[in-house]
Image: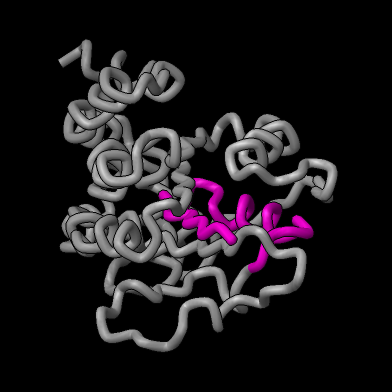
Amino acid sequence: MRNVFLIGAMKCGTNTLYKALAKHAHVATPKKKELDYFLEPHNRKPYADLFEIGPDTRVCLDGTTQYSKYPGFKHIPQTLFDFNPDSRIIYMMRDPVERLESNVAHAIARKENITVDDWRGSGKLGNMLSYSRYFTQIAPYIQLFGQSRVFLGIFEEFINDQPAFIERVCDFLDLDKGRLEIEEVHANPRRKDAGADSLSFSRDDDRRFARELKVDIDCLERHLGIDASRWWKRYQEALSHE
């Protein structure tokens, strides 16, 4: 039986992908997507007991996005590797500034001491920005598990053709695509609570965050071969006018 960790990034379609994979006859899931099991070093309840494992189970799927929130949880990559070095890691990415905007709106809707009027000065913004530094988040996993055990997915490709994308994930996990019930699943639209649906980054916001994220995205392209051109067109234009 193989352990699979869908670690993020949050607001990159992880809920939708998780629900789609959970329909596979050979995939076991826990009762809740975000287990957070390995965040607590003293969590000693048997991990396997949290999954609804049956005779056909080949994969235990854990969808905890907290596992890609460096520097908040620096120990997680090593902890997961120590638990099972043959695990598979799935990491989803999207336009990093759009992901940040969605993350800020999510925090506003949940009333996490941040509002639509004061978010630019929030102390939470630094952490949320770090979650869009995809290379920083995934590099420790690749170093430990090896690139062949890490699936890097692009959110924009996922929403463009969900069935084809899910089949690619099944190939990565050695799951029989014939046992997969493929149907488009949509999850987590932006909530309207506390005015979160009115949040929209300005051009100055785009420019600011593009500057702060560019080095990390350059590393994604240079070291992992990720084509980030679809993300950077508007930000490169904004930066070129500085």
Going 77% across and 46% down the picture, which residue do you hit? 184
Q: Position of residue 48 (x, y in %)?
A: 53, 77
Left or right, 70 with reference to 80? left
Going 81% across and 46% down the picture, which residue do you hit? 182
Left or right, 233 with reference to 236? right
Residue 137 falls inside the magenta stretch: no
Going 81% across and 47% down the picture, which residue do you hit? 183
Tell me where the magenta segment starts and ends, as one range.
1-28
Figure disc tally: 0
Residue in front for this viewpoint, 180 or 26: 26
Left or right, 103 with reference to 118? right
Q: Is residue 97 above or below residue 38?
A: above
Q: Position of residue 202 (x, y in %)?
A: 33, 36
Q: Position of residue 68 (x, y in %)?
A: 33, 54
- The image quadrant that residue 71 belongs to is bottom left
Going 47% across and 57% down the picture, which residue do you hit? 5
Left or right, 10 with reference to 81? right
**Quadrant of image for the C terminus:** top left
